[in-house]
Amino acid sequence: LRDAGIPAIAGVDTRALARHLRAHGCLRGILTAPGQTDRVAAVAAARAVPRWEDQDFVAQVSAAAAVEVGDAAVEPDAPLVAIVDFGLKANIVRSLRRRGARVRILPSTAAAATVLGPEIDGVVLSPGPGDPARLAGPVGLARDVIADGRPLLGICLGHQIVARAAGAQTRRLR
């Protein structure tokens, strides 16, 4: 790993680390090289890491533009499912395709008018990283889809977004 420049850690009691994080929540940290740790510099570097709560993870992983999977000319009777990408896993697209659906992958910033276009038969809100309480736009989008009455499926983060759109509260677990 060292020869390939790949960071790694060893000798960490992962159970103790998990207990510590459960007790104290998300903590900022850094990895340093053995024997090369200047405590003051390491603490300063860790404090410079953005807080988890201040990061927009969805924007970092979402598709930048719409992508079509499947061809309407070849599959004219296939339903078209819009997937709003909050950190989409490729297997979700494969699963929908295996079930005969065409798929339109949309960025996390897609407007309701796009997601609810007349050709869209159903909507999936994908899984992804982050806190649904920070995603007011997607929660509003889910409200619009619910009001429209089209089939809506939320997976993981998408499910939490649907729950918030329906009036539920969410909270991060430690």
Image (cartoon, rainbow, N blue to C red):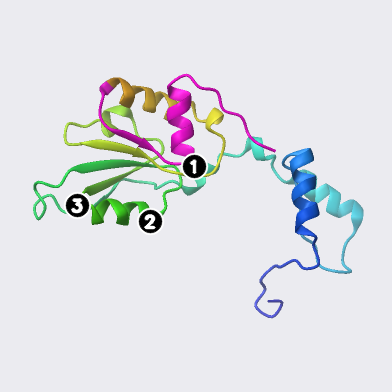
Magenta span includes 171: yes
- Alpha carbons under labels 2 and 1: distance apart: 18 Å
Q: Nearer the viewer, residue 46 or 116?
A: 116
- Alpha carbons under labels 1 and 3: distance apart: 29 Å
Nearer the observer, disc 3 or disc 2? 3
Residues at badges 1 and 3 in contact (C-beta under 8 Å)? no
Quadrant of res 42: bottom right
**Can residue 77 be seen by looking at this rendering?**
yes
SS category of the residue bearing label 2: helix
The type of residue carrying mark 2 is Ala
Q: Earlier in the sequence, mark 2 or mark 1?
A: 1
Taking 85 as reference, is 170 above or below it? above
- Alpha carbons under labels 3 and 2: distance apart: 16 Å
x then y, percent, for residue 66: 30, 45
Give the labeled residue for mark 2: 90
Say which residue appears at 30% left-offset and 20% top-offset. 147
Q: Earlier in the sequence, mark 1 or mark 3?
A: 1
SS category of the residue bearing label 3: loop
Relative to 92, 168 lies left or right? right
Give the labeled residue for mark 3: 100
Nearer the observer, disc 2 or disc 1? 2
x then y, percent, for residue 145: 31, 26
Task: Sort mark 2 into few (<14), some (14-19) or many (20+) by Cα contacts within 10 Å.
Answer: few
Give the labeled residue for mark 1: 59
The type of residue carrying mark 1 is Ala
Taking 144 as reference, is 32 above or below it? below
The type of residue carrying mark 3 is Gly
**Can residue 27 be seen by looking at this rendering?**
no
Query: Magenta residues?
Result: 148-174
Instruction: Point out which mark residue 79 bears.
Output: none
Magenta span includes 25: no
